[in-house]
Image (cartoon, rainbow, N blue to C red):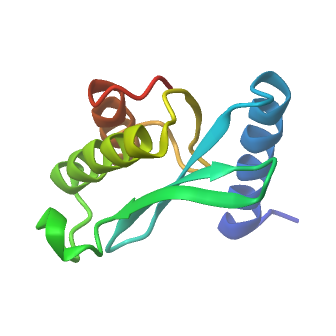
Amino acid sequence: MANSKRQLFIKRRMRVRNKLRKVNAGRMRLSVHRSNKNISVQLIDDANSVTLASASSFEKGLGVVGQNNIEAATKVGAAIAERAKKAGVTEAYFDRGGFLFHGKVKALADAAREGGLKI
């Protein structure tokens, strides 16, 4: 029996997250979520189970409300890099979840790197 798209996505997400956890112990996790209409990212401290910073295309201050394109992803990536600096975080590992590292997800990661966040 074939797996559904959702089951395959969850399998891919857990495979990515577990591999990254083994390699990047002690670093913060930059977790991305992408829907059909928005994109969001969180900087998470897994040791203390605390979200240190977040950014999303829902925020009116970024000027991309309700958009999910490469431009919106770039603005969200720049915003998370700025907020990570304010939180005192310079390094994090990039948790793409079950999403492919292509297009919007890649644009977000590149913008965060350009903003000074080492991922």
Q: Looking at this view, name the residue that lies furthest to the left.
A: 63
x and y percentages locating residue 20 in the rendered image? 74, 32
Residue depicted at x 80% and y 31% = 19
x and y percentages locating residue 119 in the rendered image? 50, 26
31 with respect to 1 (left or right): left
Res. 106 visible in picture: yes
119 with respect to 23 (left or right): left
x and y percentages locating residue 99 in the rendered image? 54, 49
Residue 118 vs 27, above or below: the answer is above
Residue 56 vs 72, above or below: the answer is below
Residue depicted at x 26% and y 73% = 59
Residue depicted at x 28% and y 35% = 111
Res. 41 visible in picture: no
Image quarter (top left, top right, bottom left or bottom right) of the N terminus: bottom right
> How many numbered circles does the render carry?
0
Residue 34 vs 83, above or below: the answer is below
